[in-house]
Image (cartoon, grey):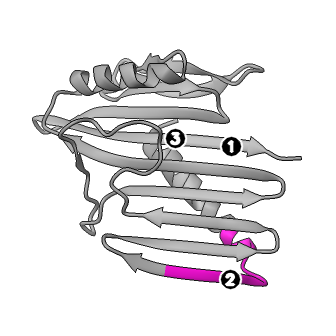
């Protein structure tokens, strides 16, 4: 799954869940700097969304010299979403950056940093999670200009997607941590 699609899907899930939980809740919205903070507290659980962050809690450093990628509204393209209920917890953090360096330099940097979390799969194409252990599997696409790095399992993984942009690169760093509670 493409990291940009995964971020949108996760944000849509968070917003849908948030709209379901709006009964008997407390909603707090704050604009701060380049981003917005939204906290929703209900009897069923809590949702916290932070946008515009330069480096949300992904567990990975930002590539040296990289700058936050600005979206059409000129706000940094980053978000940190936390959902907590008595049934599950979900933390999705991600941000997009740009660099004047070539894609391979960024791939090499993140391959090294991600190895602290386990085996790193490099994929030119889409990444899926298969098998009982839900380990990452590469679905190669020879025409793709995008390189994806992933480590972990479907419930707990880090993903970096790098692609050429002008004379440099554009890349996204994402962390997804899901825990089922009983």
Q: Is residue 164 magenta?
A: no
Q: Is residue 135 above or below residue 60?
A: above
Q: Nearer the viewer, residue 139 or 86?
A: 86
Q: Which residue is mark 3?
A: 175
Taking the image as drawn, is residue 140 in sight? Answer: no
Residue 64 placement: quadrant? top left
Give the distance between the C-alpha atoms of the residues marked 1 and 2, in whole angstroms: 24 Å
**Circles 3 and 1: CB atoms closer than 8 Å:** no
Q: Earlier in the sequence, mark 3 or mark 2?
A: 2
- Relative placement, left or right, of 1 versus 102 is right
**Circles 1 and 2: CB atoms closer than 8 Å:** no
- Per the image, label 1 sits on a secondary structure element best described as strand
Q: Residue furthest right?
A: 182
Q: Is residue 98 above or below residue 163?
A: below
**Circles 3 and 2: CB atoms closer than 8 Å:** no
User: Which residues are drawn in magenta?
Assistant: 18-29
Taking the image as drawn, is residue 26 in sight? Answer: yes
Q: Residue at x 68, y 22 (%)?
A: 130
Q: Position of residue 40 (x, y in %)?
A: 65, 74
- Per the image, label 3 sits on a secondary structure element best described as strand
How busy is the neighbourhood of tag 2: few (under 14 within 10 Å), some, or many (20 plus)? Answer: few
Q: Position of residue 82 (x, y in %)?
A: 61, 57
Q: Is residue 32 above or below residue 59?
A: below
Q: Which residue is mark 2?
A: 26
How busy is the neighbourhood of tag 1: few (under 14 within 10 Å), some, or many (20 plus)? Answer: some
Q: Position of residue 116 (x, y in %)?
A: 48, 21
Q: Nearer the viewer, residue 48 or 2?
A: 48
Picture disc at residue 178: 1
- Per the image, label 2 sits on a secondary structure element best described as strand
Q: Residue at x 52, y 20 (%)?
A: 139
Q: Residue furthest left?
A: 167
């Amino acid at each position: 799954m493409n990291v940009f699609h995964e971020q949108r899907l996760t944000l849509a899930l968070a917003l849908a869940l948030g709209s379901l939980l709006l009964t008997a809740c407390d909603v707090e919205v704050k604009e701060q700097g380049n981003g917005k903070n939204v906290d929703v507290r209900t009897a069923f659980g809590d949702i916290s969304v932070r946008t515009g962050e330069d480096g949300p809690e992904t567990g990975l450093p930002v590539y040296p010299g990289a700058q936050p990628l600005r979206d059409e509204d000129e706000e940094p393209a980053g978000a940190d979403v936390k959902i907590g209920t008595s049934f599950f917890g979900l933390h999705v953090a991600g941000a997009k950056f740009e660099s004047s360096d070539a894609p391979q330099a960024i791939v090499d940097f993140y391959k090294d940093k991600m190895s602290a979390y386990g085996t790193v799969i490099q994929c030119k194409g889409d990444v899926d999670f298969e098998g009982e252990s839900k380990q990452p599997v590469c679905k190669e696409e020879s025409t793709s200009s995008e390189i994806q790095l992933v480590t972990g399992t479907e419930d707990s993984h880090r993903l970096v997607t790098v692609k050429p942009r002008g004379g440099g690169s554009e890349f996204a760093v994402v962390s997804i941590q899901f825990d089922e509670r009983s």
